[in-house]
Amino acid sequence: MVQDKTIMSRLFDAANHSFLFLIAVLTVLPFLYVIVSSFGSMDDWIPKKFTLSAYQYIFSTNTFLRSLQVSVYITIVGTAFSLLFTSLTAYALSHKHLPGRKGFMLLVLFTMFFSGGMIPTYFVVRSVGLLNTLWSLMIPGMISAYYLIILKSFFQQLPEELKESAKIDGCHELGILWRIILPLSLPAMAAFGLFYAVGLWNQYFSAILYINDSTKWPVQVLLRQIVVLSSGGFGDSTQISQDSVAFYGQSIKMAVVVVATVPILLVYPFLQKHFAKGVLLGSIKE
């Protein structure tokens, strides 16, 4: 009977590994196809001619480089501000004797289930003068209520003795947060920082709503324009000939997809080890 269970267990493991391998292949193949097609010159599954013309073209156009700079800017600045204000708010709400703490927490929880909607949010953004500015892509979603609650719960679990000893040494609240709390929260900050960065890097719908100036489009909006427009042009004075568009049009689209995807993929492996630990911090309530 023990031998039969061992055989069944091995068969299950083999089937499980085969299934997971198949899923992995199906997941990787589309991205490999995009990469291979970006080096080709025809709409073939296997390009007949490998060339760097698509990459040379997109990096020679001011439009793409400008959109790439916009995406990098809003990702770095937006992530920094999101982490700053999330940690400040979480630290304040972690103080059990904060006046009005329960009311503030109810407001935070309310935003997790209800929102003003697209039109009211647009009017708010317009009324404060953020239309056609990069701040419209960073300020409206600067603090995630979900990340805020997790970080607040983690701050509450830290021993009060750490804070009391720091106060005895003359450290103020911001000093306690910067010198003691945040160093102990690096896994959570790294995980939430990457989540914020991915969301900002993939900004698309907000840019469509709030940005009318094409010079301020992030790379995701430009990618959409390239995919939708059959001409393959970028909408500025830098254009290639119709013959080149017909020949390299598909590879240009694929090259833009690769360039828009690779930067965030390069950051992901370095912070992946912090994901599980960072997200689980604060999940156990006192």
Image (cartoon, rainbow, N blue to C red):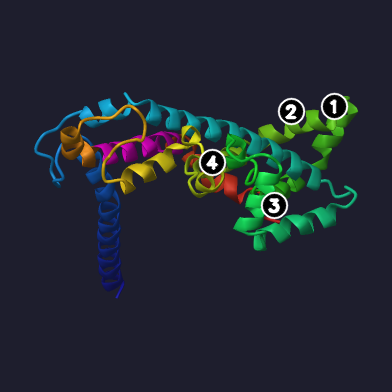
Query: In this view of the protein, can residue 146 be seen by the observer?
Result: no
List x then y, in percent, for residue 79.
59, 36
Label 3 Cα crowd, 10 Å radius (few <14 / some 14-19 / many 20+): many
**Label 2–label 4 contact, CB within 8 A:** no
Q: CA distance from mark 1 to mark 4?
A: 44 Å
| 197, 11: nearer the viewer | 197
Residue 149: mark: 3
Q: Nearer the viewer, mark 4 or mark 3?
A: 4
- Residue type pointed to by label 4: Ile
List x then y, in percent, for residue 62.
38, 25
Label 1 Cα crowd, 10 Å radius (few <14 / some 14-19 / many 20+): some
Q: Which residues are magenta?
A: 252-268
Mark 3 or mark 2: name the one nearer the start of the chain. 3
The local secondary structure at tag 4 comes to loop
Q: Is residue 113 above or below residue 52?
A: below
Q: CA distance from mark 2 to mark 4?
A: 39 Å
Q: Which quarter shows the N terminus?
A: bottom left
The local secondary structure at tag 2 comes to helix
Residue 171: mark: 1
Q: Residue at x 40, y 39 (%)?
A: 222
Q: Nearer the viewer, mark 1 or mark 3?
A: 3
Residue that badge 4 annotates? 211
